[in-house]
Image: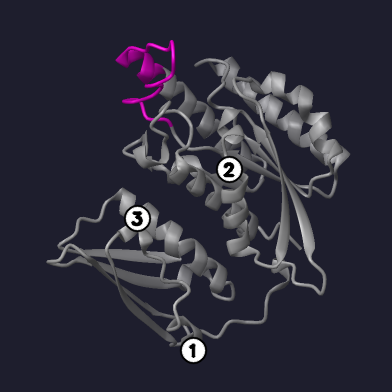
Amino acid sequence: MNIQLIGDNFDINDHTRILVNEKLGFKLDKLLTHYSSDITHALVRIQKTKLNEFMVNFDMNLPDKKHIYAQTYYQLLQAYCPVAPTPFTPTVSISPTPAVLGASTSTQVVTIALFGDSMIQTLNNNILKKSLQNYFPTIKFNLLNYGYSSTTLDKAINNLDFVTSQNPNIIVIESFAYNNFGNTTSGLEKQTQLLATIVDTIKTKLPSAKIIISATIAPNSVVFGNGIQDLHLTALDKLERTKTIRLYLKNAVKFANDFHLPLADAYTNGLVNNEGFLPLIDTTTHLHPSDYGKQFFSDTIAKTIFDNKLID
């Protein structure tokens, strides 16, 4: 889905783009599965009125000449979510529920295991379930969170046997970039080798399980670690640490691409001027995802599962 944003008395920034993509783009991808994303284009115009309200216009022409138009007002732009309104129903012909949604006479249960460090541990299962059900409304999800705080990948791998013993249908492997092996070539190679070992182990023990590599949200070097007790970092320390974390996040992205694995990339999509987008980062530690960041990361995982048709 390609969305063009136009601001009228309102500045379009990266925050706006992420917000519209979360509130609108992800859900339209779900509705328009029978259209190629290369040929679906929409125009969203956001106008700030004299009463400090937001008038939002949505305009889209589909390739088969169907026209969709919607307009609404909001006092808070964050409330904008025009996917469900009635104007969409008569103008878009939705095919019968595709097989990927797992529709059947009985409720399908899908177990998803999340394997990572505290960036996984701090995710909210309820938020992730809601993100998943936006794409798969008929499926019941059983979420297993195996996030290990302050743990490196070589230590966490010792828990992999237990994770696979739970027989998950999908396993999400996070990068462990925030608990890395230092800014060295050997450290990055070690991350790659360990990720490869994890993938091979899963394929051997659970041949039918689907594997996703995920890259969590990016750090922000200006505020990194502010609020963590007994952690006092200089500006240079913050620059060095966040640079190293970004290297490991990029390396995880590269690994997924090199091995042709589905990638849930909250890192790249959450960058603004090569820094982590501040609203995605919690204000207590300036390290883990905020509630907005958890939503963003969860939406990214759900969309990856949907786009790669990982649920039959």
Q: Amino acid at mark 2?
A: Asn
Q: Looking at the rendering, which quadrant does residue 268 occupy?
A: top left
Rendered image: mark on residue 17: 3
Residue 150: give x, y in percent of width and height: 59, 20
Residue 31: give x, y in percent of width and height: 55, 73
Figure quadrant of the C terminus = bottom right
- Left or right: 240 as drawn, with respect to 214: left
Mark positioned earlier in the residue sequence (3 or 2): 3
Residue 166: give x, y in percent of width and height: 83, 40
Q: Secondary structure at mark 1?
A: helix
User: Which residue, as the protein is rendered here, is positioned at the far left?
Assistant: 50
Residue 186: give x, y in percent of width and height: 59, 16
Rendered image: mark on residue 124: 2
- Left or right: 148 as drawn, with respect to 109: left
Q: Is residue 85 above or below residue 20?
A: below
Q: Is residue 173 magenta?
A: no
Q: Nearer the viewer, residue 230 or 111?
A: 230
Asked if the residue under mark 2 is in contact with the one under mark 3, i.e. CB atoms within 8 Å, the reply is no
Q: Is residue 187 above or below residue 96?
A: above
Give the residue displayed 85% in from the left and 43% down from the top.
206
Give the residue displayed 69% in from the left and 30% down from the top.
195
- Left or right: 292 as drawn, with respect to 302: left
Find the distance from the CA under tag 1 to the CA under tag 3: 28 Å
Q: Is residue 223 magenta?
A: yes
Rendered image: mark on residue 90: 1
Q: Amino acid at mark 1?
A: Pro
Task: Estimate how packed mark 1 is, as few (under 14), some (14 to 19) or many (20 or more) residues with alpha carbons within 10 Å.
Answer: few
- Left or right: 77 as drawn, with respect to 132: left
In the image, which residues are magenta? 219-240
Q: Amino acid at mark 3?
A: Arg
Give the residue displayed 70% in from the left and 19% down from the top.
154
